Image (cartoon, rainbow, N blue to C red):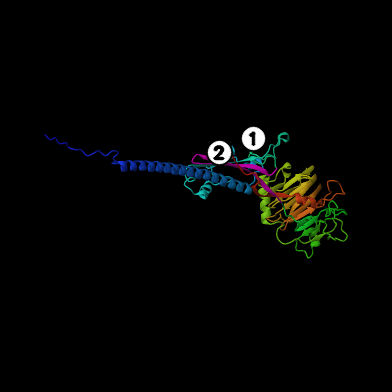
């Protein structure tokens, strides 16, 4: 009996079925991981770029606020409590400017925002600026030489140039989308020497009320060899013809000792100084709170620049003492002269008296400055237009002292405020401040 066996083909060991699918899944996983990493990195970079842009926007806004506040100081220096920044009429007692305040001495919010013109500064934006003195007024604790801004020390100081050194701190803080940057800098106002001509007198006419043989106008002053001429613009054929006496006697420079040494001529056409200097004088007086629309008191006549716009009546003074000093001379400016400015008493005045005479001298004699008593003007007198000066009394030292003693050394000390700018190497960013 024969038996038969059915043979079965062998099974394939290690079949590769499904291998491609596994490989694809692994590759896709790797690609997704790399893609997610790239996406995360890209998103982080975008966020970082946005944050950096916001920080840059807040920095730029603070910088613009600092620059614009400096420009405002250039136009109106904070030289006295009356001109403290930004002024007593705004909220918070005048201690700071901000984006919520519209005030002439503050940066303009619309201008600051439009200058940056970005999605950041057009959205959540605030800024503040403050002006503070750079040192104590107490000599024992004077810190005028400080080079670094310490908020705890500086922020509580006066918001004007209290120590009178022409330097103050300005701080600008800007916040854009909750990112805050703070910049500080010292701002110094330029001191400009005033370009007054070095003369004893400039006027239309000079009236000498004293008929004696004495020196009334000393054109050589301290006898240093520098002569300050007397310049007169009246319509007489010659300049000496513009010198009048009460008795009517003509002035003869060859024999009359009342102007000695005799130096008499014509001034240049136009006003004594230009409009720019006249404006600087008024702005300086305004900054120092020495601008008056009526006759100042005796004490108020002392100052670097005292400016009187007009007066309802004669400004008459009888003063025994001094106005200013040889070391600290000043200027008295009278803008219009509808009435006289009269000086009496035993007085020494150091500096220059300037009458702009914008409305013409008072009738009938056009005398805008009348000196009587025992008075000495150490410096110069300048009068525009048809204004006249009357002199002739005894000087403050007695019969041997003149009414006017020309002193050219004072001219270099007669100054006004100029432009203000950031002091070199003082600009910096501070943290938290």
Residue 311 can be seen in this image: no
Left or right: residue 374 compared with residue 163: right
Q: Is the residue marked by circle 1 packed among few (<14), some (14-19), or many (20+) residues within 10 Å?
A: few
Where is residue 136? Give x, y as percent: 69, 36
Residue 4: image x %, image y %? 15, 36
Q: Quadrant of residue 78?
A: top right
In the rendered structure, are the residues bearing label 2 and label 1 in contact, judged by CB atoms less than 8 Å apart? no
Image quadrant for the N terminus? top left
Q: Position of residue 386 (x, y in %)?
A: 72, 58
Q: How many marks?
A: 2
Mark linked to residue 153: 1
Category of crowding for the residue at label 2, using alpha-carbon neighbours closer than 10 angstroms: few (below 14), some (14–19), many (at least 20): few
Q: Earlier in the sequence, mark 2 or mark 1?
A: 2
Query: Is residue 420 covered in magenta?
Result: no
Which of 24/50 is in front?
24
Q: Quadrant of the C terminus?
A: top right
Q: Residue at x 70, y 43 (%)?
A: 165
SS assignment at label 2: helix
Can see residue 113? Answer: yes
Query: Looking at the image, which residue is at 83% across and 48% down?
Result: 395
156 horizontally vs 54: left or right: right
Identify the magenta region. Answer: 165-192
Residue bearing mark 2? 91
Single out the residue that lies furthest toward the bottom: 237
Q: Position of residue 123 (x, y in %)?
A: 47, 44
Spatial CA distance of label 2 from label 1 is 23 Å
Q: Does 166 lie within the magenta span? A: yes
- Position of residue 410 relative to residue 3, above or below, is below
């Amino acid at each position: 009996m024969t038996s038969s066996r059915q043979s079965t083909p062998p099974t394939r060991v290690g079949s590769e079925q499904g291998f491609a699918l596994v490989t694809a899944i692994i590759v896709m996983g790797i690609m997704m991981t790399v893609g997610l990493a790239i996406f995360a990195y890209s998103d982080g970079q975008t966020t970082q770029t946005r944050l950096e842009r916001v920080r840059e926007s807040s920095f730029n806004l603070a910088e613009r606020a600092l620059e614009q506040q400096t420009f405002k100081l250039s136009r109106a220096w904070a030289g006295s409590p009356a001109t403290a920044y930004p002024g007593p009429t705004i909220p918070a007692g005048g201690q700071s400017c901000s984006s919520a305040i519209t005030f002439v001495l503050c940066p303009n919010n619309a201008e600051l925002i439009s200058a940056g013109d970005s999605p950041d500064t057009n959205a959540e934006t605030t800024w503040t600026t403050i002006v503070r003195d750079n040192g104590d007024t107490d000599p024992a604790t004077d810190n005028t030489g400080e080079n670094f801004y310490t908020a705890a020390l500086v922020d509580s100081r006066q918001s004007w140039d209290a120590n009178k050194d022409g330097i103050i701190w300005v701080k600008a803080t800007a916040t854009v989308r909750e990112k805050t940057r703070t910049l500080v800098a010292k701002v110094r106002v330029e001191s400009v020497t005033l370009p007054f001509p070095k003369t004893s007198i400039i006027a239309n006419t000079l009236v000498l009320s004293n008929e004696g043989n004495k020196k009334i106008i000393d054109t050589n002053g301290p006898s240093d060899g520098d002569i300050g001429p007397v310049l007169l613009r009246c319509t007489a054929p010659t300049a000496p013809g513009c010198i009048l006496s009460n008795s009517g006697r003509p002035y003869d420079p060859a024999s009359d000792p009342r102007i000695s040494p005799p130096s008499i001529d014509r001034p240049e056409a136009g006003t004594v100084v230009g409009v720019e200097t006249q404006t600087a004088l008024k702005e300086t007086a305004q900054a120092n709170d020495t601008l008056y629309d009526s006759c100042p008191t005796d004490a108020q006549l002392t100052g670097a620049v005292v400016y009187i716009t007009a007066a309802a009546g004669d400004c008459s003074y009888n003063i025994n003492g001094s106005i200013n000093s040889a070391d600290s001379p000043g200027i008295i400016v009278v803008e219009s002269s509808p009435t006289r400015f009269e000086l009496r008493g035993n007085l020494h005045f150091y500096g220059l008296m300037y009458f702009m005479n914008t409305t013409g001298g008072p009738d009938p004699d056009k005398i805008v400055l009348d000196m009587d008593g025992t008075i000495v003007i150490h410096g110069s007198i300048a009068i525009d237009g048809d204004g006249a000066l009357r002199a002739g009394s005894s000087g403050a030292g007695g019969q041997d002292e003149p009414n006017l003693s020309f002193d050219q050394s004072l001219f270099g000390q007669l100054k006004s405020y100029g432009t203000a700018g950031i002091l070199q190497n003082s600009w910096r960013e501070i943290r938290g401040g």
